[in-house]
Image (spheres, helix red, strand yellow):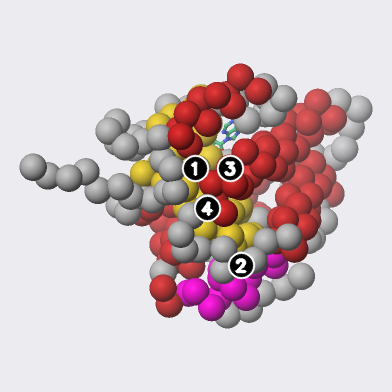
Amino acid sequence: MMMAVSRPRLVVTGYSRGLGFELVKLLQKEHDLTFVGRSEPPLRNDFADHWVKWDLSRVEDNSVRSSLLSSLQQSPGRIRGVLHSAGLVDPVGEWAEDSLAGADAAMAVNTLCFGKLVGWWLPSLQAFSGQSLVFHFSSGAAVNAYSDLAAYCTSKAAVLMFSRCLAQGLAAENVAVLSVAPGTVDTDMTRPLAHSDPERLPGLQKFRDLKKEGGYANAGDVALQIADFLFSEEQTDMRLKAHGKLYDVRKPGEVSQ
Ligand SMILES: NC(=O)c1ccc[n+]([C@@H]2O[C@H](COP(=O)([O-])OP(=O)(O)OC[C@H]3O[C@@H](n4cnc5c(N)ncnc54)[C@H](OP(=O)(O)O)[C@@H]3O)[C@@H](O)[C@H]2O)c1
């Protein structure tokens, strides 16, 4: 009789599109996945993967906790990572009276739900035999200001600082905390920025210029680089170095902050 092989499990957000989707395609070859998000996972393996439906902008909703914990109970000792790819760039534009409503959602999706997921899963990550990971997509916007992206920059700066604080309390050999900036990548998130109106959104000139220069990276190529960084044996030293720092995939070997 064939024995079922128990594979490590990753908890992933932002799997439905863009960078997260490309990353999941690669990671699914060697991992079981727990998808956390509002959209049905396009690549689910029904025998191994779990989907916990959660609109991450509703960070206060604790009704998902029991579904998450049951996924965890079915995988004792196998939780290898929490990978946060979900992101929200809106509200875009000059700060205005009604900006705060959308900014709440950006803060919830980009920052707060990650803190919540990590809080729930950290003991399991610490119990993994070998190095486990807490990963999120960072951004140049975490450290550079853009007048038309105030909510995005603020939430990305906050999640970077959260990760730095988290890393201070953890040994990188046990749980590596990795904040990775992917460069500017052609996805649903960046396309509207690249094609935005210069009169209405003067602060997004960088994105329009980059588009003209053909400077947008391909999501599949970037996901390959990131999957290698997160899990290959050869990148072990680099992961130790990047623990609690900002790693930009366009500058391999370097970390900042
Ligand atoms: N693209 C770039 O150039 C770039 C640069 C720097 C950093 N990043 C970061 O990289 C990550 C991925 O970006 P991307 O460009 O791939 O974005 P994307 O194509 O717009 O995909 C965003 C993902 O986030 C999920 N999401 C958004 N709001 C959600 C909500 N309320 N609940 C659950 N899931 C939600 C989406 O799920 P649904 O399909 O359900 O909406 C989707 O899977 C983000 O953190 C982004 O900030 C991207």
Between 35 and 77, the residue placed more toward the observer is 77
Which mark is first along the chain, 2 or 4?
A: 4
Comparing labels 4 and 2, the label whose residue is closer to the camera:
4
Q: Residue at 76% x, 52% y: name it.
A: 162
Q: Quadrant of the N terminus?
A: top left
Q: Residue at 64% x, 66% y: name it.
A: 171
Q: Which mark is residue 11?
A: 1
Q: Is residue 147 left or right of residue 160?
A: right
Which mark is first along the chain, 3 or 4?
A: 3
Mark 2 residue's CB less than 8 Å from ligand 1: no
* Residue 209 in picture, x, y percent from top left: 65, 60
Mark 1 surroundings: few (<14), some (14-19) or many (≥20) residues within 10 A: many
The magenta segment is 235-249
Mark 3 surroundings: few (<14), some (14-19) or many (≥20) residues within 10 A: some
Between 71 and 137, the residue placed more toward the observer is 71
Tell me the element at label 1. strand
Establish if 94 lies above or below 249. Answer: above
Hey, what amino acid is under mark 4?
Ala
**Tag 2 residue:** 172
Q: Which mark is residue 121?
A: 3
- Please report contact status of discs 3 and 1: CB closer than 8 Å, yes or no: yes
Which mark is first along the chain, 1 or 4?
A: 1
Tell me the element at label 3. helix
Q: Is residue 15 left or right of residue 208?
A: left
- Please report contact status of discs 4 and 3: CB closer than 8 Å, yes or no: no
Q: CA distance from mark 4 to mark 2?
A: 14 Å
Can residue 171 be seen here? The reply is yes
Establish if 76 lies above or below 98. Answer: below
Which mark is first along the chain, 3 or 2?
A: 3
* Residue 46 in picture, x, y percent from top left: 29, 31
- Please report contact status of discs 4 and 1: CB closer than 8 Å, yes or no: no
